[in-house]
Amino acid sequence: MNKSWMHSDRRSKAYELGVEAFLNFSVENLLTTTHIRCPCVKCVNLKLFGVRIIRDHLYFNGVDQSYKNWTFHGEPWEATTNASRNVEEDDDHSRYSFVSEEIEMDDNDFGDFGSDPYEFANVIGYGDQPLYPGCRKYTKLSALVKLYNLKAKHGMSDVCFTKLLILQGDLLPEGNTIPAFMYEAKKTLCALGLSYEKMHACPNDCILYRKEYEDSTNCPTCGISRWKEGKDSILKEGVPAKVVWYFPPIPRFKRMFRSHETAKSLTWHAARKSIDGHMSHPVDSPSWKLLDDKWPEFCNEPRNLRLALSSNGFNPHSSLSSRYSCWPVILVTYNLPPWLCMKQKFMMLTLLISGPKQPGNDIDVYLEPLIDDLKSLWDGIGGVYDAHN
């Protein structure tokens, strides 16, 4: 059966005819119209629906392009030969080299993109899917990564980016796979990244609106409103006066251990011996040895992480006259060898504190969620897989 429609634009006639042919094929083989597995990218054959709902899902969410053998819908299973597997594995490096260039990844990082294997399977599919029929230079994923990189580099708004996607779709040949909406582009790329939490903060740096203050509308310390005040001095309810972005480090640490080479590098320090007696890495420092003496149980497990915490303010605007100050908080993993620990991809952004003024001594208020996670790490967490050992 022809499955080329799965790679067609959802707005095209080919996709529409393909969806109807797929639904007819499923009904004929399964002999039901109400209990059919939905192959959209959101359900990935895990949920059962009727024909009408599946049709809506295929148009709204798109079809899961990694679902090549329709075994859940009556198609006989076709075994993949070892030879074809080897060819696919040889192509992996070239297939994802553009991602490596754009977002600072190496070959080992492709061991795991996220916690959801279906999301990763979708990314694999997008890496194979040409941008338009006959295109050899770009795939759907490589084009999206480059376009999104331009958006971030030049501060393009979501509305502008959506209009750019629509224009690109019109300029490219028929059957192109450029998404028509910003939401769809984000969903395609989400498997390459990790989640973050957006927290409201008191403009005077008194508290974060979390835990017992989550539902508060005024700061219990200074009494100022949680919401932003407009030019007409009217509060814009629902619009926070100050925001801090938190990027949880624990999922990223877990992901580091799931990469074979990175997990191996994280225990590099245990076998490290200073040859010339000089300090060339923090493992040679008195502070490191003091930690080993004070907490011998911590020292006995070389996979336990030694972290450095760093922060500084910078002006995100090009105008030097602006006094706006934004503060990133970064974690550095000292377990790694010196040629890796200060590389950009291993320097973890954990907090981004918005301005316009520096937090000063009140930065401890913003560090609260990070300290909570660091305490959890100290007590020990489960669900960590060491790919090296």
Image (cartoon, rainbow, N blue to C red):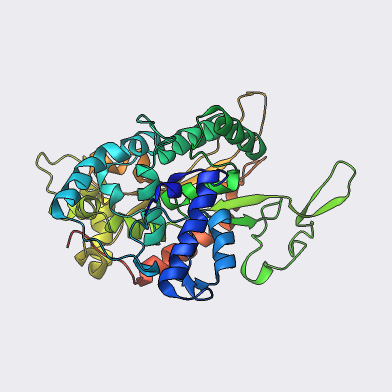
Report the side of 127 relative to 91 (left or right): right
> In this view of the protein, can residue 316 be seen by the observer?
no
Image coordinates of residue 83 in percent, x first then y, are 14, 50
Image coordinates of residue 23 in percent, x first then y, are 49, 63
Residue farthest to the front, as pictured? 28
Quick one: 291 or 208, which is closer to the camera?
208
Give the quadrant of the C terminus: bottom left
For residue 59, which quarter of the picture? Answer: bottom right
Q: How many labels does the image show?
A: 0
Report the side of 335 relative to 57 (left or right): left
For residue 29, which quarter of the picture? Answer: bottom left
Quick one: 308 or 200, which is closer to the camera?
200
> In this view of the protein, can residue 362 be seen by the observer?
yes
Give the quadrant of the N terminus: bottom left
Answer above or below: position of 196 versus 344.
below
Report the side of 375 relative to 220 (left or right): left
Image coordinates of residue 35 in percent, x first then y, are 50, 76
Quick one: 170 or 230, which is closer to the camera?
170
- Residue at horizontal 22 percent and vertical 46 percent from the top: 88
Image coordinates of residue 388 in percent, x first then y, are 18, 59
- Residue at horizontal 35 percent and vertical 43 percent from the top: 128
